[in-house]
Image: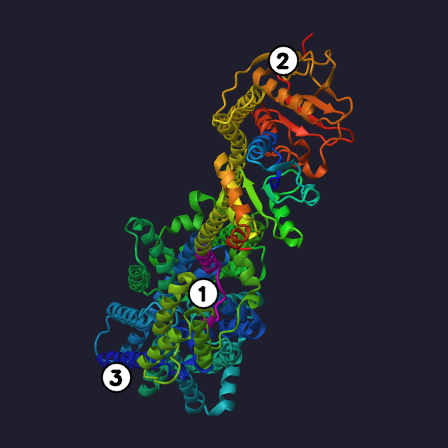
Amino acid sequence: MGKRILLIEDEANILEAIGFLLSREGWEVQGHGKGESALAEIARVSPDIVVLDVMLPGRSGLEILRDLRADPATRDLPVLMLTAKGQAKDREQAMALGANAFLTKPFSNAELVSTLGTLTDAPAAARSGGGA
Amino acid sequence: MLSFNGLVAVCVLYVAGLFAVAFLAEKRAAEGKARWLNSPITYTLSLSIYTTAWTFYGAVGSAARSGLEFLTIYLGPTLVFIGWFWLLRKMVRIGRAQRITSIADMISSRYGKSGALAAMVTLLAVVGTTPYIALQLQSVTLSFSAFSSNGGAGTPDAEATAIWVAAGLALFTIVFGTRSLDVNERHPGLVSAIALEAIVKLFAILALGVFVVWGVADGPGDMLARIEASPVIDTSWNGARWVGITALAGAAILCLPRMFQVLVVENSDERHLATAGWAFPLYLMLISLFVVPIAVIGLDLPSAGDNPDLFVLTVPLGLGRDGLALLVFLGGFSAATSMVIVAALALSTMVSNHVIVPLWLRFSRAEGPTSGDMRRVALTARRLSIAGVLFLGLWYYRLSGGAEALADIGLIAFLGVAQVLPALLGGILWRGATRVGAALGIGAGFLIWAWLLLIPNMAETGGLIPAMLEEGPFSIGWLSPATPLGLQATDRLLTAMILSLGTNTLLFILGSLFSFPSPLERLQGAQFVNVYDHSRALLGWRGAAGTADDLLIMAQRILGSGRAGRLFQSAAAAQGREGALPEPTADFLETLERELAGSVGAATAHAMVGQITGGASVSVRDLLAVADETAQIMEYSSQLEAKSAELARTAERLREVNQKLTELSVQKDAFLSQISHELRTPMTSIRSFSEILMQSDPLDDAARARFSRIIHDESLRLTRLLDDLLDLSVLENGRVSLNEGEASLSDVLDRAIYAAGALEEGGRIAIRRDRAREAVTLWTDADRLAQVFINLISNAQKYCDAEAPELSITVQGRGPEIEIDFADNGSGIPPRQQTLIFEKFARLDTAKGAPGAGLGLAISREIMARLGGDLAYMPSQVGTRFRVRLPARAQEAA
């Protein structure tokens, strides 16, 4: 049984692409497109890892991340942040808030897969590297 | 018996003594030590130039011929000094306050600084005074001859005597009258010499009187008896003539140029006038005390000769009292010389200030004189004028040939200068007096006086045109001076007085009433009439310490205490007054003024120093000059102000621009970030799917087809986005070229609805239109307008969330505009977001998932601005309503 991953991303096409890719890689993939209900979805799905887009309708991914890190239940949940803005300060902000990894769109499929692999293999090291 | 040469020697010695006194006085005054010079007694004695040789010798002659009439000459001034003291005081105050230099200056200043009026009064004064100077010269030569004919050795050459006397007097006056151009026009040396002469005069006549009463007669009792017995007091009493001459003498003391000089110009302390108020009448009383006794004895004494005008000399000479006679001779000499000196000084001031200098300025304007040159010119003019005035007197004396008629000239001259009286009194007391009135009055009075008295007198003395004077010009009888207006005048003086002064006064009043004064005249009028409101009393040298204090305080305020202190110390050291304040001498004041001028301007400095030292009020001329300077300074400072305001504006603009740039920079960053997001998002799908497709892992056909379509759609999305961005950029930069032409609104709407796909089968919105109202012809770019309509229609298609979506398009003309409303029946836009909808990339939360980058409304709004209209969101209770406004440039189609 593969690990469970929750993709929180509002662009349907991106969600479909990543979902297809990760399913083929053996992940159990769940998708969600809205910001305001993302926390509830995480609690419901209880994934092993979360891929979180920054620009979400209703609620920004950064706010969701902060709430995740504030909640003891999800404090150690590995989170990969995605953003299309591509500015350095977005990365810094995400890492400061406790993201485990950060990818700028567009990224290669291999990049995504290997990043996720690192997070699941050595979550503790990645977390300490994130400077939480 | 004194020889003629001996007499000349005495005269020369006496004159040398006068020079010495005057020189000493000047020196003391310059050192600031001459307190006696500044005493009221000196002032009063200087006033005694009123009693000239004419009265010194003539009073006794007049008493012998006409009894007590001679008293009127003393009565007039006495009454003025006692009864009209307030008028004298006002004249003195005005003279100080306005820095008046002569009677002509007084009149001209009062009537708006009129140069013509000043020249007129100057002419009058010269014409009236010249015969008077001749009279003095005559009295001196007569007294010389009286001495020599009574047994003196040598043949006196009367003419040569007169010439030498005139030359000597000219020299004295030039030396002590024009040493410098004093700001205050005061001449301490000259005044002290005059005062000394006044003492000699009085002492001589008193000595003679005492001798006559106690030496010839046996004391006062015998004297009175002799007077009773003599015909002197029996002579007929002519009341009208008494009143007339008294009034004339009173007028003369105010109007005579030489009297004005000593009374007003040479006055250094207003309080002196109070002493003079009783002391001068006393002096007149003393000098006239023994006139009757001398006349009575002279008439009784065969050896006194038959000319009563010389009794004062012939009585002592006839009785062998040569010493007394010599004293009396010196008294008469003093009377004559003091009058001539002051008259020449006064006249020269007028002639140079009001005739020569103005003419010189007019003819040398091109050369642009400096102030230094001006002083030299003024001094030279004054010296020449003194020589000229004395030469004129001498010439008149020779013309008259020493005739007896010259004796009448005294009263004639009085009446001549009295023509100034109406303008003088009116100017001081009546603000309504005007230049026109003064000129008319003085001019007419002058002409009548000259015609009725002066010319006949000259004719008598010089033998001029007697026929014309007897019968009138062109034999017109009523113009004859002998019978003016056909009057058989019993007393020509009185007739002329009434006619000339009467006409003068009448014309003065009428002229003033019927003319309008210039602004300067009105100002000066107020300054004269209300002089006490504008000035303070001049209190002479006693106030000097206070003056220096005031000057120091003022200088400190303007120059700062350090610079002022150094200036005053060095001035005090130069005066030999180390450690004290310097005396306000002319030199020091000039230096101070120059220093101050550097800070506040020359005119202001002059006015300030004048205010403190001279008790002068600030004259209108000063004020105008000060105003000029102030205006310049203000202009300069307003220029500075303007520059600083400009700088402030520039700085403010820079701040605004900077803020704008900062905002633009932030906006640009946000915009780039937005574009980045909008570009990267489709790219992400494209890349991801293309990598999946490239992988060797097998895909079923359905998945391959689906992924390819997504890639294709996302590419189109990117293209659309780039098109929109380029469109917006072109619109925002105003570089768009509009393709304007006639278009039917209805057609444009048709095209837009078709292009938006609203009519297709999948079109999810119903569109309501009123085609009748759409029948409007527009002058616009139809493609661009359609682009706006398409955007609005597709927005309604995308975002209207009603069960049965509906878009109604309504058209209405409103004035010069057409309004096209696009209203749907959805839930509308939340108020909080209504302001955001026109921002670039502003996609509302509710609009998620709908295609488009959020540039549509921004582009539409830009297009409408280019088309001369606008696009606005209209808040409404139901649904979303956008309003397009367009200018209606063409009339409605049929």
Kind of residue indicated by mark 2: Arg
Helix, strand or loop at label 3? It is loop
- Judging by the rendered image, the residue that carries numbered circle 1 is B607
Lower sequence index among marks 2 and 1? 1
Task: Indicate left or right for B344 with B836 as reference.
Answer: left
Give the vertical position of B126 relative to B294 (above or below). Answer: above
Counting other residues with Cα less than 10 Å from the Cα at mark 1, is it few (<14), some (14-19), or many (20 or more)?
Answer: many
Lower sequence index among marks 3 and 1? 3
Helix, strand or loop at label 1? It is helix
Residue B200 forms part of the magenta stretch: no
Labels 2, 3: front one: 2
The chain letter for the residue carrying disc 2 is: B
Q: Are marks 2 and 1 on the same chain?
A: yes
Q: Residue at x 69, y 13 (%)?
A: B761
* Magenta segment boundaries in residue numbering: B612-631
Counting other residues with Cα less than 10 Å from the Cα at mark 3, is it few (<14), some (14-19), or many (20 or more)?
Answer: some
Res. B2 mark = 3
The chain letter for the residue carrying disc 3 is: B
The answer to whether residue B291 is seen in the rendering is: no
Observer-nearest of A83 and B96: A83
Observer-nearest of B584 and A92: A92
- Judging by the rendered image, the residue that carries numbered circle 2 is B751
Lower sequence index among marks 2 and 3? 3
CA distance for labels 3 and 1: 57 Å
Task: Indicate left or right for B176 with B714 as reference.
Answer: left
Disc 2 and disc 3 in contact, CB within 8 angstroms: no
The chain letter for the residue carrying disc 1 is: B
Observer-nearest of B318 and A73: A73
